[in-house]
Amino acid sequence: MDDYLKIGALARLSGLSERTLRYYEELGIITPARTDGRTRLYSKKDIEVAKVANNLRELDIPLETIQAIASKRRKFKTGEQSSLAMAELLETLSSDLNERASKIISLQSDLITTMRLLRSCRNCKNKPSPTGCPTCPLEINEDTPQIVSLIWQNP
Amino acid sequence: MDDYLKIGALARLSGLSERTLRYYEELGIITPARTDGRTRLYSKKDIEVAKVANNLRELDIPLETIQAIASKRRKFKTGEQSSLAMAELLETLSSDLNERASKIISLQSDLITTMRLLRSCRNCKNKPSPTGCPTCPLEINEDTPQIVSLIWQNP
DNA sequence: GAGACCTTAACGACGCGTGAGAGTTA
DNA sequence: GTAACTCTCACGCGTCGTTAAGGTCT
């Protein structure tokens, strides 16, 4: 009995809402046991699964992918086949993550450059627009990070 | 005339769909000119904005945030005020990205460990389940990555 | 009896995909 | 004039958040 959590306790522990936990059950991602009164009982394994699912969702990994990882193994008869299929899945995920990571890194450096440029507007009394401040350091040139174009639109 | 793109051309160039470009206009993120026949004409600045928006969306940064960055400046009268507010926005974004990056890195190392474990199932003829293969290297111990619990559920 | 839990059911937001039907452009 | 493009609705989906009603468990 002590080995099981009810939904509220798991929600607090895992960071997922009760609604979300029920929804994941609908999708077959977590399959808790039940009492006679239909109260969900989450085992230690279920708890781990909930945490992992939350971690993955925080990286915006689609539920479809999570579901695939959770269910793929059952579709095979031997460890051989299953491990091959699983490895392929994880490989795909891993290379996705690599792409994301490199995008994040390059965006980070753009952000830092942009914040440095912005610091030189610290005492500027001009109107913050291309027409109000035509010599603004934000005015686009070759070295300006792309993201500046989002800030420095007309008017 | 040559300086403007119509929606189809921009879609091909930016990676955003036509629908998405129209939606971003609804939100005020991109505001193209129009011909007399209401065909949208995107300037070079608009094109940059579209690309940036796409980059940010590929990192699952919410449109709300993109919209905020695109519109915040206009709400202030001087460069001073605007740059302060903008810096705050970018700061928040940057620290979000830091968190994401570190989550990605730790997940990546879990994935690599897991794929290594899976390689030892390469010639296994057992049924891939805790009961079918009780000595499986995936069986959870202290060093097993959390994500394995997603793979290695019952039955 | 109080508080946590159950189910069903429904509505809403976000970020678009998809299609219909009509109009524009080269 | 015709082919290719574009326009404006408008509905639908996934992933929940939220509220509600009415019941059950401990």
Image (cartoon, coloured by chain):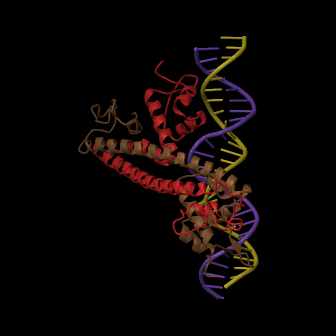
Chain colours: A brown, B red, C purple, D yellow
Residue A81 at x, y = what percent? Answer: 69, 52
Residue D12 at x, y = what percent? Answer: 72, 46
Q: Residue at x 50, y 30 (%)?
A: B32
A61 is higher (above) or lower (below) than B25? below
Residue B147 showing in the rendered view: yes
Describe residue B151's horizontal placement relative to residue A150 as left or right. right
* Residue situated furthest left in the rendering: A123
Residue B13 at x, y = what percent? Answer: 52, 29
Q: Residue at x 38, y 41 (%)?
A: B74
How many discs mark residues in the rendered view?
A: 0
Residue A16 showing in the rendered view: no
Residue A4 at x, y = what percent? Answer: 63, 77
Instruction: Please name whichever residue, A111 or B128, is drawn nearer the observer in this view of the structure.
Output: B128
B92 is higher (above) or lower (below) than B13? below
Describe residue A86's horizontal placement relative to residue A138 as left or right. right
Instruction: Please name whichever residue, A44 or B58, is drawn nearer the observer in this view of the structure.
Output: A44
**The C terminus of chain B, quarter of image:** bottom right
B21 is higher (above) or lower (below) than A111? above
Describe residue B90's horizontal placement relative to residue B40 as left or right. left
Q: Residue at x 69, y 75 (%)?
A: A39
Q: Residue at x 58, y 46 (%)?
A: A92
